[in-house]
Amino acid sequence: MQLSDRVSFLIIAYVMINVTVGKMRSVINELKKIEHVKSISVVAGEYDVIVRVHSNSLEELFEVTEKIHAIDGVERTTTHIVEKEVITE
């Protein structure tokens, strides 16, 4: 089977981000520039930001998370891949 013969499907993931104090605005501005980032939410609790990512492959998701890790002010990330969406708007 060739790569072009493979079926493509949408991978949805949530990336939870811890941000260095004082770096929130600059981190958000950099996140806005990353292709495949569909939403950015500032939250209270264990994480500071939750990013929704849509990608066409695990490799593409890996590349997106690598870009997020490279942002100055991103301390730590945790990525959660959606197995099934039950309710969508």
Image (cartoon, helix red, strand yellow):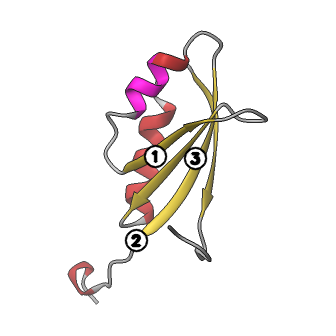
Point 42% across, 33% down: residue: 31
Residue 38, compared with residue 22, is above or below; it is: below
Q: Where does the magenta region start and end?
A: 26-31
**Image position, residue 62 (x, y; %):** 46, 52
Circle nearer the N terminus (2, 3): 2
Callout 2 environment at 10 Å: few (<14), some (14 to 19), or many (20+)? few
Q: Which residue is mark 1?
A: 39
Determine the secondary structure under disc 2. loop
Q: CA distance from mark 1 to mark 3?
A: 10 Å
Callout 3 environment at 10 Å: few (<14), some (14 to 19), or many (20+)? many
Determine the secondary structure under disc 1. strand
Predominant secondary structure, magenta span: helix
Callout 1 environment at 10 Å: few (<14), some (14 to 19), or many (20+)? few
Q: Which residue is mark 2?
A: 10
Residue 21, compared with residue 15, is above or below; it is: above
- Is there any visible trace of residue 78 in the rendered image? yes
Point 32% across, 34% down: residue: 33
Is the C-beta separation of discs 1 and 2 under 8 Å? no
**Image position, residue 84 (x, y; %):** 60, 77
Determine the secondary structure under disc 3. strand
Point 41% across, 46% down: residue: 64
Circle nearer the N terminus (1, 2): 2
Res. 22 image quadrant: top right
Amino acid under disc 3: Val
Which image quarter holds the N terminus?
A: bottom left
Q: Is 10 placed left or right of 52 in the picture? A: left
Which is in the foreground here, disc 1 or disc 2? 1
Q: Which residue is mark 3?
A: 15
